[in-house]
Image (spheres, rainbow, N blue to C red):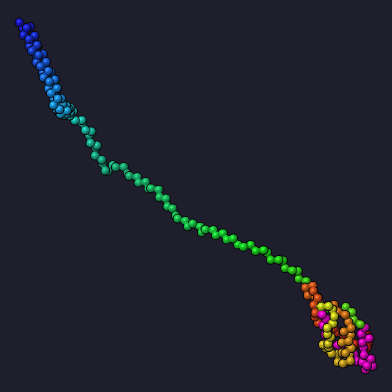
Amino acid sequence: MAYYQHDSSYLSRRGLVLLVIIALHAFLIWAFAEGFAKQGVRYVQNILQTNIIQTEKPKDLPPPPPPVDLKERPPVQVIAPDINITVPTEAPPPIQVTTAKVEAPPPPPRAIVPGTNMKQISQPDISDYYPESSRRAGEEGRTMVKVCVNAAGKIESAEIQTTSGFPALDQAAVKLAKASRFKPATQEGKPISTCAPLPVKFSLHS
């Protein structure tokens, strides 16, 4: 009799569970049909998350660090930063290139040819021009005659520059100078006209 009671209670529990399951399915079908399935799912998720959060135990926080003793603090080393000082340098002035006109070198100077003086190249015998009157009178003297000769070597003029003191001797000296031949003076290698003194000496003892 006890065995029968136990079995009947067991069957009644199973029937109850079966009814609950059938009722749950019916409810779910009705909820899906009515559009409350999503709300039910969300409601179930909220309940689960609430239970999970409540069941989680708060973790133990790490202990706070020990207080720092300011007296035993190690010295602070300050490292100076590297400072790069750049001194601005002035840019060199631009190089100006000037194209100078190259001139032709001047011609070399001409060689200077020294000039020459007028020169007597021939003279007649003085005794031929000594006046007889001066000989008899014993007149002697030296006359300086200025003779001018052109570039061709011809005598242009002859005149007394310094007298001998005797007119006859001076005239004889001019005649002798005109009878002489001269080489003209030169300048830079070319003959030129010039004048030069010609001494004529009359002496009875020569």
Q: Does residue 94 appear in the picture of this structure?
A: yes
Residue name at image x 9 percent, y 11 percent: 11
* 44 relative to 108, above or below: above
**103 lies left or right of 7:** right
Instruction: Find out whether residue 138 is within the magenta segment.
Output: yes
Q: Residue at x 88, y 90 (%)?
A: 171
One can see residue 114 in this view: no
Q: Quadrant of residue 24?
A: top left
Of residue 32 and residue 57, the one placed in the foreground of this image is: 32
Q: Position of residue 165 (x, y in %)?
A: 86, 92
Give the image location of residue 19, x and y in percent.
Answer: 10, 16
* Above-or-below relation of 179 to 46: below
Quadrant containing the C terminus is bottom right
Most extreme residue toward the top is 1
Name the outermost residue toward the front: 33
Q: Camera-side residue: 158 or 204?
A: 158
Quarter of the picture holding the N terminus = top left
Q: Which residues are magenta?
A: 125-150
**Image side of residue 40 versus residue 133, left or right:** left
In-front residue for pair 87/121: 121
Identify the residue at image location x=87%, y=87%: 174
Residue 10: image location, x then y, percent: 9, 11
Is 203 situated left or right of 105 in this image? right
Q: Is residue 203 above or below residue 33?
A: below
Residue situated furthest left in the rendering: 1
Magenta region includes residue 53: no
